[in-house]
Image: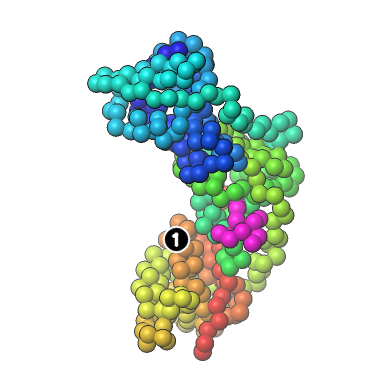
């Protein structure tokens, strides 16, 4: 069978689904893309057995419907340096020999039969469906993914928790030291349901979702989730387990509030971190009347640094220690010009929020304190 397709369109689609594949797979067929031709459309599937990503590309010509596989590295390397032009693939479905022709040359590669390629999992009729804007889903993933845990001691904390309630959708990420809770009030559910999304599909979605108002469909069951847009469908297995009660660890009555210029604080933290202990990255924040002293030291190397910032603060003096690198991460994931610190005492978690919340969302970030020596 023969098909003709734009080389750049095909390479773009292959590159987008290639991010699903692992460097090493338990089944050799998973090193391949699955191609399924139907009339003038060709779907392309990549899977690692846990996560499956499907996209499609329009064909210029096609002689018949067919299914075949090609090793991902082989086809990507074949197309990578070919400029944008129509390319013809002649596939012998008996021998799986593939001959490619383009304006200035040709190539020959060998494909694989599609019979062994695993069929994607279907969610079934019992799945729940929600429609939401791509930009809102992308923002929720972006602002919570960095707070998830990296170790496998508590697997449920290595993913993002999607908590659907009658009032909102809550995105939650935590590793036990920092926590992000983002509420989106534009999304509602008839009942409280939720799931935990693995870090890998969350990262894949970050690269695929558009920062716009285009609608996508989010469907899930107890074990699987699926995100479908006009350009792709991602299906993945969920993390099994009960997510911790994230609301119970958020202090409800931190009485002291300071408003700080976010960019100025990030810059000060980065400068002071150079002189603080490389092992602990401990930074001391000393809140005073309308000022904040940011300091750090490394006793072993006799280095120290201190900077003073102007802030909006009129409560009692308070000194609190944070891991500076984590604080920089948190501030880097808030988009407003100013942030608010809500504090109680040096032993209680500090809350960091935008100084002014958007009308249709609420973002709260929590950071556990570190003990100060003085």
Is 156 a magenta residue? yes
User: In front here: 355 or 36?
Assistant: 36
Task: Provide residue 331's location: percent of width, then percent of height.
Answer: 46, 63
Label 1 crowd bin: few (<14), some (14–19), many (20+), radius 10 Å? some
The residue indicated by pointer 1 is 332
Place residue 47 in its image quadrant. Answer: top right
Asked whether residue 155 appears in the rendered view, the answer is: yes
* Residue depicted at 37% across the width and 85% down the height: 301
Q: Where's the N terminus, which quadrant?
A: top left
Q: Residue at x 42, y 13 (%)?
A: 2
Secondary-structure class at tag 1: helix
Residue extent of the magenta highlight? 149-160
Q: Is 329 inside the magenta-drawn segment?
A: no
Q: Position of residue 128 (x, y in %)?
A: 70, 37
Q: Is residue 95 left or right of residue 26?
A: left
- Colour mode of the rendering: rainbow
**Residue extending furthest toward the bottom:** 374
Q: In the visual, does 215 lie left or right of 301? A: right
Q: Residue at x 67, y 44 (%)?
A: 188
Indicate the position of residue 246 as horizontal and vertical percent values. 67, 61
Q: Which sits in the foreground, 166 or 244?
A: 244
């Amino acid at each position: 069978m023969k098909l003709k397709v734009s080389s750049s369109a095909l390479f773009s689609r292959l590159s987008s689904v290639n991010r699903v594949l692992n460097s090493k797979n338990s089944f050799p067929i998973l090193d391949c893309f699955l191609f399924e031709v139907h009339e003038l459309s060709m779907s392309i599937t990549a899977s690692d057995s846990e996560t499956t990503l499907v996209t499609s590309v329009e064909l210029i010509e096609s002689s018949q419907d067919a299914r075949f596989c090609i090793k991902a590295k082989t086809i990507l390397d074949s197309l990578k340096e070919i400029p944008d032009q129509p390319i013809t693939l002649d596939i012998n479905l008996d021998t799986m020999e593939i001959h490619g022709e383009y304006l200035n040359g040709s190539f020959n590669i060998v494909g694989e039969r599609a019979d062994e390629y695993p069929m994607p999992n279907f969610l079934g009729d019992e799945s729940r469906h929600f429609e939401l804007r791509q930009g809102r889903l992308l923002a929720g993933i972006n602002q919570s993914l960095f707070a998830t845990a990296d170790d496998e001691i508590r697997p449920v904390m290595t993913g993002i928790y999607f908590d659907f309630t009658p009032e909102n959708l809550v995105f939650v990420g935590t590793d036990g030291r920092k926590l992000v809770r983002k509420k989106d009030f534009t999304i509602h559910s008839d009942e409280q349901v939720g799931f935990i999304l693995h870090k890998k599909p969350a990262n894949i979605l970050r690269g695929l979702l558009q920062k716009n108002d285009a609608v996508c469909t989010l469907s899930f069951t107890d074990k699987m989730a699926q995100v479908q847009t006009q350009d792709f469908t991602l299906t993945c297995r969920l993390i099994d387990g009960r997510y911790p009660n994230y609301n119970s660890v958020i202090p409800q009555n931190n009485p002291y509030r300071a408003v700080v210029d976010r960019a100025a604080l990030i810059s000060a933290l980065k400068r002071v971190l150079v002189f603080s202990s490389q092992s602990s990255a401990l930074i001391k924040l000393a809140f005073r009347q309308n000022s904040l002293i940011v300091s750090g030291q490394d006793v072993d190397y006799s280095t120290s640094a201190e900077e003073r910032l102007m802030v909006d603060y009129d409560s009692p003096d308070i000194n609190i220690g944070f891991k500076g690198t984590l604080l920089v991460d948190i501030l880097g994931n808030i988009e407003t010009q100013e942030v608010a610190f809500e504090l109680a005492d040096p032993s209680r978690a500090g809350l960091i929020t935008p100084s002014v919340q958007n009308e249709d969302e609420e973002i709260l970030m929590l950071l556990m304190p570190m003990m100060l020596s003085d």
